[in-house]
Image: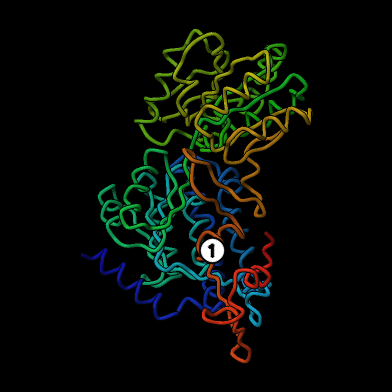
C-alpha cells in the first residue's frame, strides 16, 4: 500500500504540470549535478566496497558519464523541448504543423548491479530532463552504492518527484502491478522478458537494455598490438562484468598465435599482480564466482594465461582460453566475467554467415582496415559496436546506445534519451478564415478526378 500511495502521489504531481516548465527541470538537474560532485569521494569508497573497483575505473566508466549527461541537457534542453514546425501539404491549406515532445508521466527505471551508478543515473537524468516523475528501483546487490544514491536523491528531489528504492524481487514484482506510463529496465535477457511480459499486460511502452554474446573479430590485416590493448581493456574492465565486453575472439587462423602472444604480454603489463592489481575489480557475488570458476576448472588444460582465483576475495585473474576445435558453453553462453575464449576461422564470409543466424548481440567488434570486410560485417544484426576498438561507442552522446531483439529494445544517451522518455505528439493547427468546399461530400467538385488533382495523385 505504501508503494502504491507513492505511485499515486507521483501521478498527481505530474498531472499538476509541475514538471513541464524547462526551468524547473534544469534547476533540479543542476542541483543533482552539484550533489553528485559533492559526494564524489563517497562514491569511490562505496564502489570499492561493493565491487572492488578503483576510483580511476569508476570515474572513467561511470561517474564522468553521469556528469557529462547532465551537462548535455543543461545546454540542449531548451532547444530539444521546443515544438518543431513542419511543412503541411496543399490538402491542408491553410494550416501549420507542429511536433511536440511531451513527457510520458510516471516512469519506472530498473537498474542493475554491474555498473550501479551509470546504469541507474543515466536513464534517470534523461527521464527528469524530459519532464517525467520517476521511481528508481536499484539492484539489492550493491548495499553501499544504494545507500549513497538513496541519500543523494532524497536530498535533491521530493519523493513525489523522484524516489529511490532497493529491496529484493518482491519489491519489483509489486511495482510491476502498477500502471506506469513508461518502463526503462537494464538487466539480463531473462529479466527483460519477465518485465516485458508484465508491461505488455497494460500495454506500457518500454525500453530494455539487455546483454548478449558479443563477438570480437580479428582479421588477418589487423594491427595486433593495438587490437590486444583495446580488447584487454574492453574485456577485463570491471573484471569482465560488462554487458558490452567482447565475449569471445574470432581470429584469422594465420594470426592466431601472434595474437595470443600479444594478448599474453598485454595482460601481464596491464595486470602485473593478476588477482590483486590496482585497477582490477572483484566478482560481484559467490554465485557468479562459482559459475565462472567452473568454466576454468572444466577447461584447465586449455588455459593460455590466468586461471587463478581466490574465494575469500571473490577474485579471478584475467584468463585467456584456447577453445579451437571444442564444444564449450564458453562459446554459447554470455560469460560476464574475466574469461576470454579464443577461436580461429579461415574464411570471413563463414563467420559473417554464422553470426547472422545467432541471436543479435548487444555489441560487435571488428579489427580490420579492409573496407569491403567492414561493410560486410556491418550487415550482421547487432545493437552497436566499434571498428578497431571496443566499448567506446557507449561514451558518445551523439550515438544512440541500445540493443536489438534479444539484446534489447530501444536506445538512449543524450538526445536519444529525450526521445525515449517523451511521446512525439503531432498537432495540425488549421485556419478558420478559409475553407475548401471540395473536401466535403455532396459538392460538385467532390469527384474522383478532382480529388486526385487535389491530393496530387496521378493515375
- Residue 212 seen in the figure: yes
Q: Residues within 10 Å of mark 1 (few under 14, many from 20)?
A: few
Residue 447 at x, y percent in the picture: 59, 73
User: Quick one: which residue is furthest to the left in this view?
Assistant: 1
> Is 141 left, or right, of 272 in this rendering?
left
The quarter holding residue 320 reads: top right
User: Quick one: which residue is furthest to the front in this view?
Assistant: 444
According to the image, what is the colour scheme of the structure? Answer: rainbow
Residue 132 at x, y percent in the picture: 46, 68
> Is 224 left, or right, of 84 in this rendering?
right
Residue 360 at x, y percent in the picture: 53, 34
Which residue: 55% across, 42% down?
54
Give the answer, above or below, for where 91 lies relative to 360: below
Q: Which residue is mark 1?
A: 38
The quarter holding residue 333 reads: top left
Which residue: 46% across, 70% down?
156
Give the answer, above or below, for where 192 lies relative to 427: above
Which residue: 32% across, 62% down?
179
- Residue 154 seen in the figure: no
Which residue: 30% across, 57% down?
175
Q: Nearer the viewer, residue 274 or 392?
A: 392
Residue 83 at x, y percent in the picture: 61, 75
User: Quick one: which residue is furthest to the bottom in this view?
Assistant: 433
Q: Nearer the viewer, residue 14 or 231?
A: 14
Amino acid at each position: 500500500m505504501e508503494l502504491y500511495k507513492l505511485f499515486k502521489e507521483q501521478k498527481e504531481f505530474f498531472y499538476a504540470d509541475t514538471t513541464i516548465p524547462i526551468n524547473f527541470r534544469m534547476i533540479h538537474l543542476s542541483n543533482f549535478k552539484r550533489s553528485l560532485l559533492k559526494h564524489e569521494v563517497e562514491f569511490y569508497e562505496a564502489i570499492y566496497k561493493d565491487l572492488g573497483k578503483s576510483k580511476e575505473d569508476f570515474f572513467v566508466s561511470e561517474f564522468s558519464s553521469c556528469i557529462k549527461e547532465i551537462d548535455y541537457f543543461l545546454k540542449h534542453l531548451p532547444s530539444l523541448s521546443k515544438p518543431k514546425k513542419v511543412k503541411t501539404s496543399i490538402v491542408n491549406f491553410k494550416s501549420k504543423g507542429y511536433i511536440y515532445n511531451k513527457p510520458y508521466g510516471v516512469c519506472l527505471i530498473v537498474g542493475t548491479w554491474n555498473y550501479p551508478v551509470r546504469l541507474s543515473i543515466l536513464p534517470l537524468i534523461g527521464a527528469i530532463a524530459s519532464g517525467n516523475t520517476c521511481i528508481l528501483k536499484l539492484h539489492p546487490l550493491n548495499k553501499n552504492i544504494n545507500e549513497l544514491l538513496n541519500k543523494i536523491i532524497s536530498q535533491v528531489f521530493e519523493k513525489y518527484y523522484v524516489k529511490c528504492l532497493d529491496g529484493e524481487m518482491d519489491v519489483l514484482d509489486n511495482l510491476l502491478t502498477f500502471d506506469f506510463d513508461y518502463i526503462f529496465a537494464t538487466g539480463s535477457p531473462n529479466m527483460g522478458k519477465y518485465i516485458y511480459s508484465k508491461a505488455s499486460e497494460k500495454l506500457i511502452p518500454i525500453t530494455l537494455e539487455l546483454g548478449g554474446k558479443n563477438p570480437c573479430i580479428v582479421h588477418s590485416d589487423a594491427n595486433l598490438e593495438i587490437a590486444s590493448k583495446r580488447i584487454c581493456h574492453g574485456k577485463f574492465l570491471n573484471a569482465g562484468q560488462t554487458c558490452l565486453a567482447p565475449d569471445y575472439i574470432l581470429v584469422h587462423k594465420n594470426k592466431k598465435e601472434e595474437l595470443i602472444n600479444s594478448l599474453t604480454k598485454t595482460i601481464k603489463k596491464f595486470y602485473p599482480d593478476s588477482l590483486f592489481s590496482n585497477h582490477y575489480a572483484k566478482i560481484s557475488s559467490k554465485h557468479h564466482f562459482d559459475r565462472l570458476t567452473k568454466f576454468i576448472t572444466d577447461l584447465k588444460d586449455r588455459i593460455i594465461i590466468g586461471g587463478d582465483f581466490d574465494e575469500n576475495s571473490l577474485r579471478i585473474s584475467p584468463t585467456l582460453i584456447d577453445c579451437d576445435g571444442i564444444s564449450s558453453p564458453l562459446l554459447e553462453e554470455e560469460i560476464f566475467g574475466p574469461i576470454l575464449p579464443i577461436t580461429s576461422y579461415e574464411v570471413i564470409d563463414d563467420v559473417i554467415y554464422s553470426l547472422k543466424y545467432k541471436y543479435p548481440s548487444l555489441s560487435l567488434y571488428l579489427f580490420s582496415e579492409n573496407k569491403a570486410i567492414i561493410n560486410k560485417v556491418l550487415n550482421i544484426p547487432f545493437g552497436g559496436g566499434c571498428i578497431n576498438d571496443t566499448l567506446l561507442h557507449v561514451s558518445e552522446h551523439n550515438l544512440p546506445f541500445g540493443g536489438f531483439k534479444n539484446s534489447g529494445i530501444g536506445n538512449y544517451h543524450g538526445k536519444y534519451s529525450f526521445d525515449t522518455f517523451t511521446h512525439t505528439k503531432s498537432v495540425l493547427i488549421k485556419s478558420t478564415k478559409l475553407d475548401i468546399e471540395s473536401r466535403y461530400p455532396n459538392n460538385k467538385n467532390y469527384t474522383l478526378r478532382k480529388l486526385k488533382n487535389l491530393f496530387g495523385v496521378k493515375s
